[in-house]
Amino acid sequence: MFRTTVFAVALSASMVAVLPFMPSASARSEFDDCIARLADHPKVGRLGVGVIDLDLGKSYQYHGEQRFPLQSVFKAPLAVAVLEMVDSGKLSLRQSVTLKPSDMSVAYSEIADKFVAPEQQITIAELIEKSVQESDNTAADVLMQLVGGPDRVNEVFAKYKIRGISVDRYERQLQPSILALRPYQPGETIDRAKWQEDKSHATGAAARRAFRYYLEHDHRDSATPAAMALFLQELYLGELLSPESTKYLIDIMAATKTGVHRLKEGVPANSVLAHKTGTGPDLDGINSATNDIGIAYVSVNSLPEKRKFAIAVFLSGSRLSEDERDAVIRDVCRCAVGQIVENSRK
């Protein structure tokens, strides 16, 4: 009922333990050169990459310790916080939640677009799937309330000593703040038509200041690529959730509907990618964030079995078009695939 796709997740004791690793000079040079060629464009903005070879434990970074806006990438850690409560028996995937007009968030939200007052029922499983696969903001905000707010999501990172990721606001708070608009508080009914109108007119000096602060100084709702790759590694290894919940979430991420031209296009045919995208607003021709993180199960003709790696790619402050930004992320993934294949031959 709950799984939209099914594939096996290796969680056996035979898995290679992932240890801290610094690539050799030649390996680092090959990977860095590949990424640097992509970053060397006057409009590309700031690019950050974190990669972990999940079979060998080798890690690769490009601006891996810099902070980048998360945008909807946070919905993968949010799902972990929800599933932790499922594992402990505090919540159930079959549990129904009553949605009211005051639960509807800012766009994007198909749930809000199709909501029929005064209320409707939805299961926690459906909320997770819509949040992760479709990046629905209403689903994410409702789940955030269910787990106890952003601090509860951050407790997951603290518990597993994952430093460099911070989730601080609901979507209904974050998205308006980026453009100096008044944030909506949990439980506040949003006039979504007025929100869209206000957003379209948020182009003045105040919006520019807020937008610049969000890109350059605000560490709230941000992450380093290295930390996010570590989060994915811990998810893959089954360190964050029960085997059932781990498989459930990775299956959901493998059926993500957004970002089909990002990491998804960067893996070879017959590979599997379990991923979560994030995309922020534009102002004055500058995009705030175009991101994609995922666990790749790579099928390469020259290798007898799939190779696995975690990858986090963040692109901020870019003046490229959406298609061009997607292509940068796709090509970063191809750089990573090349490095993983090279690792297997050594």
Image (cartoon, rainbow, N blue to C red):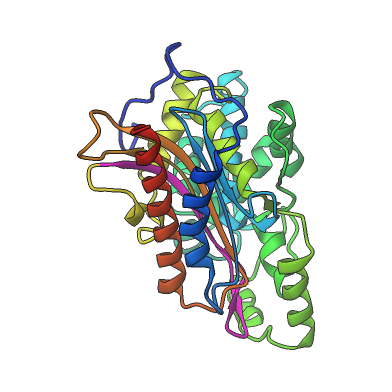
Above or below, 336 against 299 in this view is below
**In the rendered view, does 51 fall on the left or right side of 260?**
right
The N terminus - image quarter: top left
Q: Is residue 230 left or right of residue 256?
A: right
The quadrant holding residue 21 is top right
Observer-nearest of 330 and 322: 330
Viewer-nearest residue: 10 or 54: 54
Q: Is residue 181 visible?
A: no
> Residue at horizontal 25%, vertical 40%?
300
Residue drawn at the location 53% of the way across and 20% of the way down: 17
289 part of magenta stretch: yes
Span of residues in magenta = 271-292
Q: Residue at x 27, y 38 (%)?
A: 299
Q: Looking at the image, which residue is at 69% across and 34% down? A: 162
Would residue 56 be found to the left or right of residue 70 on screen?
left
Q: Position of residue 54 (x, y in %)?
A: 46, 31
Is the residue 327 above or below the residue 64 in the image? below
Q: Is residue 24 visible?
A: yes
Question: Between 232 and 206, which is closer to the camera in this rendering?
Answer: 232
Which quadrant holds the C terminus? top left
Q: In the rendering, at what x and y percent does residue 77 appear?
A: 60, 40
The answer to whether residue 15 is above or below residue 38 is above
Q: Is residue 158 magenta?
A: no
Q: Residue furthest top?
A: 13
Provide residue 253's location: percent of width, then percent of height.
42, 42
Front residue of this view, candidates 326 and 203: 326
Work out which residue is located at the far front of the displayed protein and give it.
26
Left or right, 278 with respect to 180, comes to left
Q: Main secondary structure of the magenta part?
A: strand
Where residue 37 sits: x, y (%)?
48, 66
